[in-house]
Image (cartoon, coloured by chain):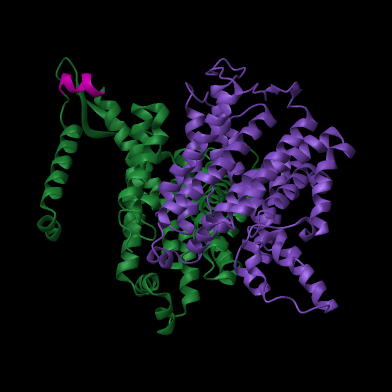
Amino acid sequence: MDTRRLFSGGFSLTEIHPAKLAVVVFLIAYPSFTSDFFTYQIGAYSLILGTIALSLMMLAGYGGMVSLAQMTVAGFAGYLVAILGDNSMDVMGLGWPWWMSVPVAILSAALFSAFIGAISVRTEGIYTIMITLAIAVAFFYFVRQNYPVFNGFTGFAGIEPPTVFGIYWRDPVPFYYLSLAVAAGFFSSVLYASRATFGLSLQAIRDNPRRMRALGYDVTLHRIVAYFLSGIIAGTAGVMMVWFNGRISPGSVGVDVVIDILVIAVLGGMRHPIGPFLGAIAFVLLENFAIDLIDRERFNTVIGVAFLLIVLFSPDGLLGLWNRARDKIRFRKNARPYRGGAAQGDQHAAGSLEETKP
Amino acid sequence: MRQFIERHTFWAIVLLIAIGVLLWLIFSVWPDWLIDAIGRKKTFVNTLLNGVTLGGLYFLVASGFTLVFGLMRNVNLAHGSMYLLGAYIGYEVADATGSWFFGLAVAFVAIALTGVLLQVLVFRRMEGDDLRQTLVTIGISIIAADLMLAVWTGTTYQFQPPEWLFGAAELPVISVLKSSGEPVFIKYPVYRLSVLFAAAVVGIALWLFLSRTRIGMMIRAGVNDREMLAASGVNVQLVFALVFAIGAGLAGFAGVIGGTALSVAPGEDIRYLLASLIVVIVGGLGSVSGAAIGALLIGLAEQFGLAYFPTYGVVLTFLIMVVTLAVRPQGLMGGR
């Protein structure tokens, strides 16, 4: 068992699995061999959705708090960008420069998320789902009815990413790299945080809050801070989302979208930060190519059935399917007895990919 | 009651004064300064009645939700879909047979059967795994909403209730005095009053069923300790199926009642799911009396919000939820 090495910072390039390097190279080279549609509508969109789902995965996987309000937090940041910056609707649009409006939007979203956390941390398990769902729906109805600030049913349009360094960031290729940078940044931060003291105590709180409280940890504070951090992730992704779409309306924070995020996270698997991104890719591919399988109108049925099948047969999502298939192959080969970590890996989130290190 | 007064004398007095003020507001003829302060009496009384009726409707939906949760610890997020499905089925049957009451009965039975199927085929397979059950119900509600959209399209449907439920009844409440001194009475739709009546009947029936019958006793025992109930020789699975049938059936029943009072359209499932969620969060999960209090509170808040500060009606509902969670996380009537 070399578990200790997992938590002690330093690592060298040779330790990285070649498959991971291949994935990185593929992601960086991706725009060079695909069309604009694949770069923007599939690539960038999956990365943004994956980042929002990552914020949920962080809360649910490490903190044991399944919050359905992550899309609401993201939408809040998106709305703030439209309100503080420029839009073409003649409502609000305070015209702040991007370097002011974006940090303010992200920070406010994080505070909003911490507020949601403060409301819901006093409850546990399914109560959290119910309360965050109620908050999400209430936010949806609120922005739909509020005209002076949120421009009601119409929402905002004409929200443009800024032109910085002479690059127009809405163009497919720059936007793809921007999304990739945001996604990769948050992916590695979550991975790092999961092994830092904070992440470890959060996971311990998930497993046994009473014991942690008895040990002197402030359980409530840890949870609220987790909500705050996930709010930063969701808020940033929300800003990316509003730049991606160019507009935002109550439909962007509607119940179906809120639940889509949960679907993505569950589809991918909540044990490892890579799960949400796998889920997002599967989701976006299904969304775009389900027309070939079945009538486009019935996309929700397709995604619902996929979600149901995953929940019923593989609670760990695609990641779990993949791990199980690989274990089976290894078992057949009988190359070497699989480490005892497998049983633990089923229960704990601490990086199922890490445990596969040969 | 006497115990309550002895224990919480202060709150009992506050409550009595509040009830007194409310009765005075309803039955007296308003003086001018009051009309200047909060508007016409007609608006107030109508809002109050609307709120109470809406509360009745919410109670019909939420009581099934809370009953299922109380016994099986299963948050059925497909409850809203059952409401909508009940409304559609009831509409089809009522439209085909011409009898509104037959539609109501069929909706109840059909949704009750759906509930039993759900319990037997899905929930029994993953007992004790709360989170997974909840996720499954989310999946089911996604599929159900989409399939219902495919079958019944996005059109809004309107029920045709029996003739005698139409029209307005004159209430013994004076709105204003005409200059001739002749009183003007407030009128209110008969149908809405009957919604309130139906909710009251269902509430009382549920209470009698739970507290006075043998099966009700088993259910209450199951809420307290499931394992012990099973150990004492009761077929728990049968009780579960029964409770699920009642809970789901009530959702279908409410679908027809609510669909007649308002209308049937896609998206209503989410609205009533949200209503049930907030009602049971406020009232306390698993408590039927809590659902009644919560439903009344939320119904009133929603209608008063709509009448007196239109844009922020939702916020009022939300505030009630937040305050309840801050003061009593287990809900008003929820026990821990």
Camera-side residue of A5 and A47: A5
- The structure residue drawn at horizontal position 34% and vertical position 42%, both measured from the top left corner, is B320
Position in image of residue A331 (x %, y %) = 80, 77
Which residues make up the magenta segment?
B31-38
Give residue A345's quadrant in the image: bottom right
Q: Position of residue B144 (x, y in %)?
A: 62, 51
Looking at the rendering, in which quadrant would you find the N terminus of chain A?
bottom right
Residue B315 position by quadrant:
top left
- Towards the viewer: A129 or B253: A129
Between A342 and B45, the residue placed more toward the observer is A342
Chain identifier matching the green colour in the rendered picture:
B
Q: For the point 44% across and 62% down, which residue is it?
A: B69
Q: Residue furthest right?
A: A33
The relative height of residue A256 versus residue A6 in the rendered view (above or below) is above
Q: Position of residue B121 (x, y in %)?
A: 61, 68
- Chain A as rendered: colour: purple
Any part of residue A155 in sight: no
Q: Position of residue B33 (x, y in %)?
A: 16, 20
Residue A352 sits in quarter = bottom right
Question: Main SS type for the magenta part?
Answer: helix
